[in-house]
Amino acid sequence: MLHIGCHLSSSRGFAAMGRQAAELGADTFQCFLRNPRGSRAKELDTADAGALADFLRREGFAPIIAHAPYILNLCGASEENRAFAREIFADDLRRLEHLPGQLYNFHPGSHVGQGMEAGITLIAQALNALLTPEQTTTVLLETMPGKGSEVGGRFEELREILDRVDLGEKMGVCLDTCHVFDGGYDIVGDLDGVLTEFDRVIGLERLRAVHLNDSKNGCGSRKDRHACIGEGQIGLEALSRVVRHPALRHLPFCLETPNDLPGYRREIALMRRAAEE
Ligand code: FE
Ligand code: FE
Ligand code: ZN
């Protein structure tokens, strides 16, 4: 069976998200652990987190994804900026241990003019300072469109980071269909070719989750504007091939499409049908 869910707001707490996901027909979901554009986080309610952990186990959910805040940049220009990012990252990882065995997805960062090599070095250094042998969370580098000075627009950049992280077994990759398409990987015309390239450069065993999004813009546009399924330039047919692909179909898929909850419910059902065809 396809494992699919969507991005949910965490404002009503952990256990409420689990129930909401199930109501939408999902068996995974994604959320922020704090304000996505800021750093502030409420005190963690351990009973609420425990209730979600029980729910996920009982309902047989696929791993869920906690998404790092967008402002987090492990390769910012100043040490102050980077230390702030590491602090948030470390706090999120600590929180996630109340939900054992889940995924923490982050945007590798933007090198802001320091150069790709310097950016990759800073990200790997930060990860080496942050990851611990005891953690049960797998940390995912998200594939990015390569907008501006973004790191992670090429598979080679993610591979470089992974190669330099000591606790490699704690790391994986999340493939965002909108981002890779925007970054110039043609998943519409040649999905097999893109996945062969991913396997050659990174290794498909590193792939742990998929962000399932259509894109408002064309292949190589580097715009990062998500569209609803079937309303963008990737299209329903190509996204159906993604969820059906033998190299991908076992993974958790998460919608990050511009939707309200009824829209998410429709897209989850739509992709479940597409996966069966
Ligand atoms: Fe993301
Ligand atoms: Fe994404
Ligand atoms: Zn995006």
Image: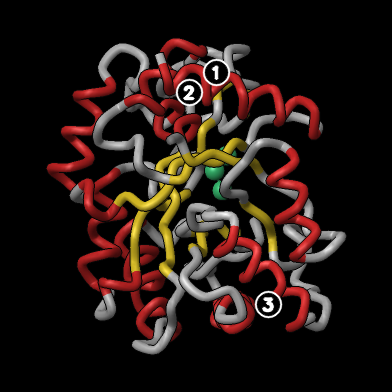
* Circle number at residue 85: none
Q: Quadrant of ligand 2?
A: top right
Q: Is residue 110 visible?
A: no
Q: Which residue is mark 3?
A: 50
Q: CA distance from mark 1 to mark 2?
A: 6 Å
Dot 3 crowding, Cα within 10 Å, few <14, some 14–19, many 20+: some
Horizontal side of residue 206 vs 5, given as left or right = left
Which quadrant of the figure contains the C terminus? top left
Q: Nearer the viewer, residue 148 or 234?
A: 234
> What amino acid is labelled 3 in the image?
Gly
Residue at which label 1 appears: 217
Q: Amino acid at mark 1?
A: Asn
**To which residue does mark 2 refer?**
221
Viewer-proximal residue, 97 or 42?
Answer: 97
Residue 249 picture quarter: top left
x and y, in percent, of residue 171 in the image: 34, 66
- SS state under label 3: helix
